Image (cartoon, rainbow, N blue to C red):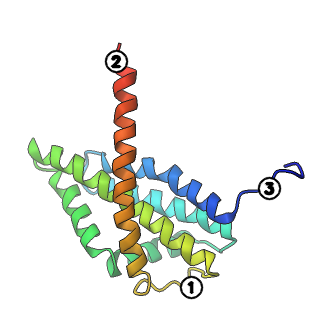
Amino acid sequence: MTETQTEPSKQVRAEAIINKYLPWSLGAGLVPIPIADAALIGGIQVKMLSEISQVYGVEFSENAGRSVIASLLGGVGSTAVAAGTLGSVIKGIPGFGAILGATTLPLIAGATTYAIGKVFTQHFESGGTFLTFNSVEAKKVFDEKFAEGKTRVATLARNLDAKVSKAVDF
């Protein structure tokens, strides 16, 4: 970088990482195999956390990442997790189940991924680490960011749909 260019802030870099993984989690939510979709979504979220922790210089291990995600979703995102699990299981029902699961789980996967990224960005911004993370205290932030994430995902889905429609329009 030249002297006139400055490196983006950690928060801006973390936001770019969240935006990078959001479409991936949506796509994983479309996987037609129940439970496999949840495993893919979890892997995407762990990878995202790994990259965000690198931005903040926070030591990361995959086990710690999976553990804090599970504690966050178990402690504060139980409604989202239940709906996501239900969306995954519903895919196994022939016909209507596949359609309903394909519309429910990507939304929840995207919103959850967004919320996890935002919660940890805020936590790391305040000097936190994986060892100091408290899922109970993160509940309010997660709930707010999950609602915000649903809006972001809906907008992203509309934009992708418009691009696909335009690309297929001869």
Indicate the amino acid at tag 1.
Leu
Pinpoint residue 109: horizontal percent, then vertical percent.
34, 57
Mark 1 or mark 2, whichever is nearer to me? 2
Q: Amino acid at mark 3?
A: Thr
Q: Nearer the viewer, residue 59 or 148?
A: 148
Helix, strand or loop under label 1: loop
Q: Which residue is mark 3?
A: 6
Residue 80 visible to an observer of this rendering: yes
User: At label 2, which amino acid type do we have?
Assistant: Asp
Q: For the residues marked 3 and 1, what is the alpha-carbon distance in whole angstroms?
A: 31 Å
Q: Which residue appears farthest toward the right when viewing the image? A: 3
Q: Picture coordinates of residue 90 (x, y %)?
A: 15, 54
Q: Residue 110 is drawn in which quadrant?
A: bottom left
Find residue 115 and report its horizontal and vertical position in percent.
42, 66
Q: Is residue 10 left or right of residue 25?
A: right
Residue 94 shows in the view: no
Question: Which disc, if any, is residue 169?
Answer: 2
Residue that appears at 33% across and 78% down: 74
Q: Could you tell me how far apart the alpha carbons at marks 1 and 2 are, in whole angstroms?
A: 51 Å
Q: CA distance from mark 2 to mark 3?
A: 42 Å
Tell me if residue 99 comes above or below residue 10 in the rendering. Answer: above
Q: Is residue 30 left or right of residue 133?
A: left
Q: Nearer the viewer, residue 145 or 33?
A: 145
The residue at which mark 1 appears reads as 131
Rendered-image quadrant of the C terminus: top left
Quadrant of the rendered structure where residue 75 is?
bottom left
Q: Determine whether 62 is above or below 106 in the image.
A: below
